[in-house]
Amino acid sequence: MIHFRKPDFKRLKRRGWKMYDFHVHTKYSYDAFAEPQELLEKAASLGVGFSITDHNDIRGVMEIYNNDLGVEVIPGIELMSQETVEVLAYFKNIGDLERFYNIIVKPNMHNDGHWQLDLPLLDIVREAKNRFDCVLSAPHPSITGSNITNLVTRKEVLKYLDCCEAINGQIPHFQNRRALRWYRKMKRRLGRRSLLGGSDCHTVDQFGRVITCLKPKRSLRNISRLHNEESSVFEMMTKGRHMVIGTENTTWRSFPTYLIGQVSAVFHFKLLKRIWHKLTT
């Protein structure tokens, strides 16, 4: 289920949904400004879990993975391939993410250290899936430049993907609609893939604009009772019931953050990022 509206966190919690923002950036991404601790505090106030998915970086999630606020933090990373196409990877524990980073990401980092890896996307998803059994998702598949739909090897890549981003909080509504149309075509060809959503926040105020609500299916509940444990978030991501709720940033609101982030990335204006963070928080 997809709903383009503002999430009602209290009502969703009362109805038994587990809520997550699956696309979050911190100051360790070249184009973002959010402090990990501030994101953690906001997540606690909203009652949601989240995944830090910094660009080719894991310092943000390492900082707050173990926290005293009871917030579930999913180890994640957003990777850009040699073809400048992006993929989101979610790991079952922080150790797997750290090993993946040290074995796959760090040795293949491009010279600029931020933008991309010197690996084709097919190699990235194959290594991530086969060696680390993580959950892979296609972020903002309708954006030109990081668009997986135009990739020459897309058929080989798509079979490794578990999920597709249904609503991204940083892109216009028509692009999210385009992503949903692409998802339906992919579903007909390759079978069911789960739909996720995330704010793609780069500042704290954008956090939780889009959330994914998860519930285990009845069969998963029965298995969990036999093992005396709850269904894991990873079971629910790929096999459970999904509902994505959220609203997008309007173009005029997201453009200043995007512009300053790109300038900071190119020229390494760390002072400019700090000033913008102070003005927007």
Image (cartoon, rainbow, N blue to C red):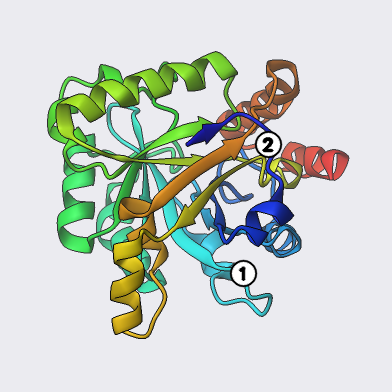
Residue extending furthest toward the bottom: 228
Number of marks in picture: 2
- Provide residue 140's location: percent of width, then percent of height: 45, 29
In the rendered image, the vertical position of residue 257 relative to residue 72, given as above or below: above
The answer to whether residue 173 is left or right of residue 185 is right
* Numbered disc 2: secondary structure: loop
Amino acid type, residue under disc 2 in the picture = Phe
Q: CA distance from mark 1 to mark 2?
A: 32 Å
The nearer-to-camera label among 1 and 2 is 1
Q: Nearer the viewer, residue 131 or 226?
A: 226
Residue 113: tell me if it is visible: yes
Q: Are marks 1 and 2 in contact (CB under 8 Å)?
A: no
Query: Where 2 sits versus 250, above or below?
Result: below
Give the vertical position of 145 relative to 54 (above or below): above
Left or right of residue 274, residue 72 in this image = left
Residue pointed to by mark 2: 269
Give coordinates of residue 80: x percent, y percent.
36, 37
Residue 110 in view, yes or no: no
Q: Which residue is mark 1?
A: 71
Q: Which quadrant, please, contains the C terminus?
A: top right
